[in-house]
Image (spheres, rainbow, N blue to C red):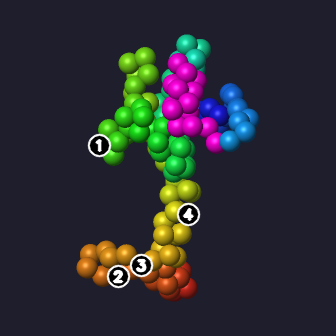
Amino acid sequence: MIRGLYSLWKMPICYFLPATSVKNCILSELLVEVIKRLLDCGFHVKAVICDQGTNNVAALKLLKVTKDKPFFEVNERRIYSIFDTPHLFKNLRNHLKKSNFIFECKEVSFQDLRDVYDID
């Protein structure tokens, strides 16, 4: 699906119905091909957004996307990779429910978030 950055429109552009999940090498090739076609049509592709699914992350790694270089290039244009924010929060919640973590030398738990919510 493509959507405007500064205008409220979106349009599905392609879909696939595989019998199993799409392998990361195929997914990365499809992503580059779709972006090339969009550029050929005159679109200004700035970013791709996806959740942190295993195949999505692996496809981005094949495109050499890293924390220090959060983009890949298609036709000499930088295409930035952005993880889907609601999925980031969902994953953070799920990790907090499973186990606590240390932040600034203090243990943080999911109960801490519930307590803050209740206070608010």
Q: CA distance from mark 3 to mark 4?
A: 16 Å
Q: CA distance from mark 2 to mark 1?
A: 28 Å
Answer with left or right where residue 60 lies relative to residue 107. right
The question of residue 27 being in magenta is answered with: yes
> Which label belongs to residue 21?
none
Residue under pointer 2: 107
Secondary element type, mark 3: loop
* Residue numbers of the magenta segment: 21-36
Q: Are marks 1 and 4 in contact (CB under 8 Å)?
A: no
By secondary structure, the bulk of the magenta-drawn segment is best described as helix
Image marks 2 and 3: residues in contact by CB distance under 8 Å: yes
Label pair 1/3, CB-CB below 8 angstroms = no
Horizontal and vertical percent position of residue 17: 74, 35
Q: Sequence order check: which comes first, mark 1 or mark 4? A: 1
Mark 3 Cα shell of 10 Å, populated few (<14), some (14-19), many (≥20): some
Where in the figure is residue 12, as x and y percent of width and height?
Answer: 70, 32
Residue pointed to by mark 4: 90
